[in-house]
Amino acid sequence: MAYRLNELCSIYPITPSSTMAELADEWSSRDRANVWGTVPTVIEMQSEGGAAGALHGALQGGAMSTTFTASQGLLLMIPNMYKIAGELTSTTFHVAARSLATQGLSIFGDHQDVMAVRQTGFALLSSASVQESHDMAAIAQLSTLRSRVPFLHFFDGFRTSHELNTLTMLSDDDLRTYVPHDLVRAHRDRALSPEHPYIRGTAQNPDTYFQSRETSNSFYLEVPGVVRRAMDEFAALTGRSYGLVEYHGDPEATHVLIVMGSGAQTCHQAIDHLTAQGEKVGVLQIRLYRPFPVAELLAALPASVERIAVLDRTKEPGAGGEPLFLDVTSALAEAVSNGERASLPLVIGGRYGLSSKEFTPAMVVGIVEELQREKPKPRFTVGITDDVTNLSIEYPADLDVESPETHRAVFYGIGSDGTVGANKNTIKILGGQEGTYAQGYFVYDSKKSGSRTVSHLRFGPEPITAPYLVKEAGFIGVHHLSILERVDVLRTARRGTVVLLNTPFAPEEVFAHLPEPMQRRIIELELELYTIDANAVSRAAGMGNRTNTVLQTCFFAISRVMPREEAIAAVKASIEKTYGRRGADVVKKNHAAVDAAIEHLHRVEVPDAVASDKGLIAPVPDHAPDFVRRVTAKMLLDEGDDLPVSALPVDGTYPSGTTQYEKRNISDIVAVWDPETCIQCGNCSFVCPHAVLRAKYYPEPALDGAPSTFQTAELNAAGLPGAKYTLQVYAEDCTGCGLCVESCPVKVVGPAAGTGGERKAINLAPVLDREPTKQNVAFFEAIPVNRRSRVDFAQVRGVQYLEPLFEFSGACTGCGETPYLKLLSQLFGGRASIANATGCSSIYGGNLPTTPWARNKYGRGPAWSNSLFEDNAEFGLGLRLAADLQTDLARRRLEQLRGEIGDDALVDDILTAEQQYESDLSHQRARVDQLKERLDSMTGPQAADLRSVADHLLRRSVWIVGGDGWAYDIGSGGLDHVLASGRNVNVLVMDTEVYSNTGGQASKATPMGAVAKFASAGKETIDKDLAMQAIAYGNVYVARIAMGADPQQTLTAFREAEAYDGPSLILAYSHCIAHGIDMKKGLDQQYLAVNSGHWPLIRFNPVLRMAGKNPFLLDSPRPRFTLEQYQRNELRFRMLKNVDPEGAERMLEFGQAQVERRWRDYEEMATRGASEFAADAKE
Amino acid sequence: MERAIDLTTTYLGLELAHPVVASAGPLSQNAAGVRALAGGGASAVVLYSLFEEQLRAEANRDAALLDAQEDRYPEATDFFPDVEVTAKSAAYGYLKLVEESAAQLDVPVIASLNGSDLGGWVDFARELASAGASALELNIYFVPGDVRTTGDLVLKRHLEIVQAVTQAVELPVSVKLSSSFSSPGNAALQILDAGASGLVLFNRFLQPDIDIETLGMDNAFELSTPHEGRLPRTWIAAIRNHTQASLAGSTGVESADDVIKYLLAGADVVMSTAALIRHGRDHTRTLVAGLESWLARKGYASVAEARGLLALPADGRADAFERGGYVAALQAAKQRYGSL
């Protein structure tokens, strides 16, 4: 709707609004016109601030312009929103309303972002459903053009933005009728033009600013009427009727709820349930929130109302109440005081649904019951347990008010296994049947690999208006055995629910393999149990591990949502539609899979009695810390909703290193070490994205008591005769990505047993029994970590002995970023502070329940924090500045206390320590420990002062890490400024050349010719050479690295960057799932990237410049491959041939020329004299 | 004045200046390569084969990559814009090569399609025709690795493909077939009956070798050698007088002698890649010059006069011809190597 009614979309990706912008970009790249025949321009900016700026300019230029955003993105638009409103400019923003980053970030939905812009002068219009979002988008557009007041149209992030539901759409003709073109021309006529020039944006003074601010009042007064008229016209056109505020319930209600957004639908259902029982209740839904429609609100409230509960999906700490509550209260109070109303009802205010917290009809009933108490809580929360301030209210959690006519189904799957896709397809099939309505909503856990997905589907003969998860399902599909071992998958079962399990077991064996609680529920609730070995059926049908067709067929066969034969025919027809373009053989295979599915689907005979004593797998081990057992474990069991307020940290501070307690076992194949052939080079351990390959050497006696399957080899390093070596695979944490196998230089003659492929010193093999691994890991952990002072850090071989303090993250299988972070943690983790830009690395680095940044045995480890997306460099600089201040204070106090300490040598050593290399640092740490011991026995404020900052006498390693979206785009200005500051910060850019976290949008690092979102037609400009920008300063250490091409250069660059007393910038090539590659080949692609000249390895070391040498080092050999040889392995480049083959060829030519040109420049620089580079005044 | 010798020949209805044609192979991978082949004197150029199944496999691989990304986590339900990934678009480069070559060259350009099942042949054939190919060579590379596959089925597959393609396009279609039929001559004639305008004898199956060091298979491709020309010549000689359709001899063309032998057996054209790789694109001229001087030496005024002189008469007994050749060969071997 927004696309069809605008000429410009000025956008920036942010979840959950990105999809709107992506669709706009796709349509634009396919030349799809808006309703007036113009193909809208879609421009991706460097930030939401930039998007708002460009939008403001476009509006002033007369273009019909829009944007899509959410959360902190909307906050970045605020300055422009004031301007746009102050200038009475017509526009509609579409916002998928989302939580704000406060004590923690959340991508999920509530109204905090929208409420933060209610003062800007934008009109705020709220939608409660998918259909309303479509309709209100048109109503907002017509209203803004008529009123000149800018509109913000919002709907609930995820709950509405990502819900699939049956939708009736307006045609282009409808829209042309609805939004008269003369309004568009009037908007255009208000544009700036040198043909009739005037100026806008003057600077005003005390004499007139105030009055000027009052000039727009009349426009705002008219808005409710304008929207009312737009809604009436819309009703006339479509039959769908809306009000600014809308009352639903008993016309003589005494108790009324007031709510906005999708929660209104939930309230409707609950109110219907209560009125059917004779309760005098109702709900008032607010659609137009700003300007607040006081008159309409008062008119819509039944005169009989005695008590009102106002529900806000937001939180304003310290406020007298949340905004909607205050608005309602003031409207009522004023009405009473001016005599419009006889009495003031009791009004209470409550918060619900923050961060997409479930909001159910049961909760609504709970609110009504609270309202009916003699003394209801004046402020309350619902949906959580607040055992600290006791604001939460009780509700009848088991209440289910849904129509029995509605089929409800729940499916458990794993991310990317096809479950969600198949369910979306099922919704299309069923929603496409005459007279059937369908709804789908999908819940994911927080990991990027092996994440659990739960699909909630509803179908029925009436429109489905239930914006909450399925509570009681008639069908439950469990698509992976591993899920039912870990969580209660029958939570939503009711009597007679049909349950489908995908298991490898024969029908007569299945039941015995189920956990005891599951068996019990199956018997108690008389569940109808079915089983299929979907993996085997799919493999036999030639579809590999894609089980979606098989399992979807089973659903249709046994769920009774449609007559079986009809359903199967519909599935087959849908397959033809979906896969037709992939060729007849693909369709044939899928059709065969449908038939085979029916053949291999079996009903399980359920015995009368439970036959297992096996419970669910414990989410964390008994030895886990208290917090992990009490809090983290609940989240892992999908029971985080039950955690009370008191269980959670007050300021968002969580313990480090909790991924070690979550043994996810997500892969059926894991790395297996071959001690016989291993040359102990450390390559595999170096590249392992999940830190599951750990090496130690130890004296032979350490093997006493080793489990029989514990693997060991003679250490092959010189100087340690008789020492043993073990490379331990943490198999329960291994994701089976295979990067280790790729990196192994050993090529063993002969295929590995059973694999048929080539064998190396590390291989992937199926997991047969997890028990020995657990014992071996436990034994390995008991062997002491090798002392850092005995390890050669300068060699990749040595790094394997350094303990990783970044482990088992939930990053994608085979992630190209995490090996760099792991290396950082191994080298500097014990004294590192890390500022992490929002993005992939902040999600796999900091998304609850478990986080990967860990501690060593001394309790030291990286101190990690994520501020925002845009400010990361500045945030990290702040960490540096604070550290420098405290170091400075410590040094001063140390001097002052020299006499009292009584050890001049110690004080001098501390103050003059070099602290450049590991040996210096370990000596300094020992000295600081000695000092602290001394200080513990001293008294007085100065000693206490020194004690509080003594740790800063050890040089702190400040790291600023993030992706290219941050470094090249949104944080570019800040990064530039921080690099120019000359301060000792280390910046690590993990460059995937695309916005990976939000789903593959182009950044300024995206190479020419790559297809990405917002570059559907292939990126037409070359990527920014950030390295050269930084080199221009002369005093910035710069390295461009790629672990897969040259691990040694990677290691050297990290060490040089950290040792350099000034700003450092490391640009690390990170292969990524968003490149469209076989992730197993990620390192090979890195090699090609470097050796085709796409990513030349360089180092620029100002220290060399100071020593009179050329600081610019070209570390990679002259390109030996063409750019095409690198690009052809990546779908992002291949895809352009589909879209625009000629363009693809042209861009490849340009790209190749650019590679050659840049190489010549670099070669020339590598041969310059030192004096031809900028010098640092510090010299 | 020396009498001019008429070297012209007709292949798939195309008038060619002489019978030496560049066969499908690595030399025609790009427009420059095709130009060099024509510039070197080839009377027609068969482009390298478009491996239809490979394209389809690539398209399916891309689709699988997209599937593997789908619905991964809440912020990224996919990673690419919704772009159609099909084999057809992947063939773009080939179609463009056909188009450019056809426009630039004054010798006919024959497109070549390689595959083993019906798949997308028809679609591609249409595309190739509209891109400007003068003719189409179907390279039916069907290795019945599944030993349950019967010989009948193999031939049936060939006939299906030929019928489907020849019905779909106006272009003359030749079929490059393998020698591994129970009755190659009969198979050839059935394929012609199914609608093909000509045959190319024979396709060489890559025969992987065993590497005793790695205990793996070695797929190294080897260029053909002159003695490999004997088998196709035998069957060209057998078929020649049973059909008016075009026959092309492929495999083992190293020198003008090999070209002449093919013509004597009854080939309309002779195709070579190996010799051009070994001796350069201009080697075509050497072959043609050798042919011309032989014709002059033997007193033939044209290629047509020499063609098929040693073909088996239509009413002759091919088995006797073959058996005779076999017996004679054994006799010769005995003389050379002693008793066998």
Image (cartoon, coloured by chain):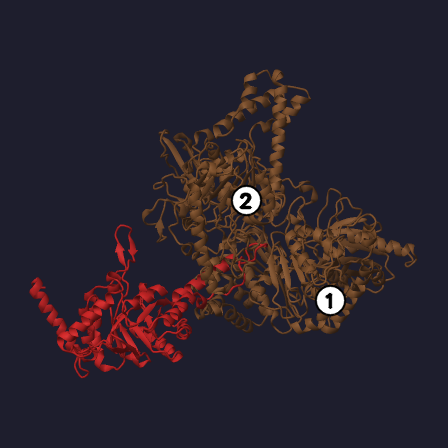
Left or right of residue A225: residue B284: left
Residue flagged by tag 1: what amino acid is it? Ala
Closer to us: mark 1 or mark 2? 1
Alpha-carbon distance for marks 1 and 2? 61 Å
**Direction from residue A748 to residue A769 in the image, left or right:** right
How many residues crowd around disc 1 within 10 Å: few (fewer than 14), some, or many (20 or more)? few
Q: Earlier in the sequence, mark 1 or mark 2?
A: 1
Q: Is residue A51 above or below residue A892?
A: below
Chain coloured red: B
Res A409 visible: no
Tell me the SS state at disc 2. loop
Q: Residues within 10 Å of mark 2 (few under 14, many from 20)?
A: many
Which three-letter amino acid code belongs to the residue tagged 2? Glu
A930 relative to A328, above or below: above
Residue farthest along the bottom direction in this orientation: B315
Secondary structure, mark 1, is helix
Of the chain colours in the picture, the one used for chain A is: brown
Residue A186 has which mark?
1
Above or below, A534 against A970 in this view is below
- State the residue at coordinates (15%, 75%): B296
Q: In the displayed structure, would residue A551 be above or below residue A1054?
A: below
Q: Looking at the rendered structure, which numbered label has been put on residue A662?
A: 2
